[in-house]
Image (cartoon, rainbow, N blue to C red):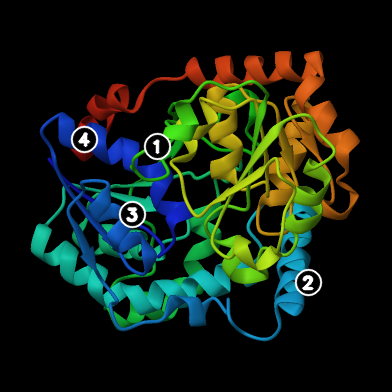
Amino acid sequence: MRVLFTLPPALSHLFPMVPLAWALRAAGHDVLVATSGSAVQAAARAGLPVVDVAPTVDFDAVFGVRTGAAVDRAAEHRRRGEAVARNGGATTAPIFQRFAQVTDLMADGVVRAADTMRPDLVVHGRLQGAGLLVARKLGVPTVEHGVGFVREGDLAARYLPHLAATFERHGVPLELPELAAVQIAPPSMMIGEGTGWNMRFVPYSGGGELPDWVTAERRRPRVVVTLGTVLPKVVGVGGLEKVLRAAGDVEADFVALGAGLTNLGELPPNVRTAEWVPLAGLLAASDAIVHHGGAGSTLTAMAVGLPQLALPYGADEFVNAGVLDRHRCGLSADVDSVDGALLDALLHDDELRGRAEWARGELADRPAPAELVGALAALAG
């Protein structure tokens, strides 16, 4: 079976899809990833064949990550995230419009890749409209791959009108192909309605060597602090300063991950900074995590069974923080309210730690990616 994976040009969309691509390759199927931007080299580093479908496009400019002052970008990011939360997690029209623009920029390259590969099956990131396009063009099924806790059974139907110009340009009828879905969060935590397969979330944020200090003997608890892969480019890392200053009041060691942290100046002596460390490996040797509420960070912490504190900024982060609150397997707060007492509670609340372990069990109970390969092959016929 030949399977084409296509996704928006972002690590947050690629990383959740890598384990299923691995499972298909390990079962002997041919896999090709069609994406662009930062996801190209990341897919290659994951050991996957990949084609850059829009090598001349600056997607950071398309997404406006450098437009205006960081404080203004942060306000706009928050406004959009709060709108998504008010909408119950459902994708809003502005998001459809932005990703339809991204789809159009990538569509020519995805169509070329599909025409060359002639896939039996397409797997597309939930906002990659080019997956719908090439599946309908070639008459093959496509599988919408989830990235978090939101399930929208009508997502593709609501997205389709925004893709009209792209479908017309390629001479493809504005109709949905045969469509299935894979979700990666446990059913007990999913938001919204929809059908499809539920697959175990397998943490992946890039391979790499763990520094010696990760596995060295520890005398105190360790807390990881991260804003993920996208947010620092949009709002900067200044919001972490209050968190890391408060860390000085806690009897624990803190590891802050991300580029640009040296701009924060002198930090408390119990704070270590690193630009990047494989997150799942670091969390396995840690006791808690503070993050921005991104789906990848939230699910990775759940998979390891760690208490977590989400500090949502925008996108789906308020929705994910709400999941933690409802299931009592994590805390959420505004970044300006973080103090030593909150960080201490994150480490020492026994009920919270027990609920985090419950969440780990919920994830572990789902079928592994390898267990879905047969169903995908049957779908492809």
Q: Nearer the viewer, mark 1 or mark 2?
A: 1
Quadrant in which the N terminus appears? top left
Distance of mark 3 from mark 1, alpha carbons? 43 Å
Amino acid type at circle 4 is Leu
Image quadrant for the C terminus?
top left
| Distance between the alpha carbons at the discs numbered 3 and 4 | 22 Å
Name the disc covering residue 75, or none: 2
**Disc 2 to disc 3, C-alpha distance:** 38 Å
Q: Label 3: which residue?
A: 177
Q: Marks 2 and 3: CB-CB under 8 Å?
A: no
Q: Mark 2 or mark 1, which is nearer the start of the sequence?
A: 2
Asked which secondary structure carries label 2, the reply is helix
**Which label's residue is closer to the chain start, 4 or 2?**
4
Instruction: Identify the amino acid type marked 3.
Output: Pro
Q: Are marks 1 and 4 in contact (CB under 8 Å)?
A: no
Between label 2 and label 3, give the one nearer the viewer.
Answer: 2
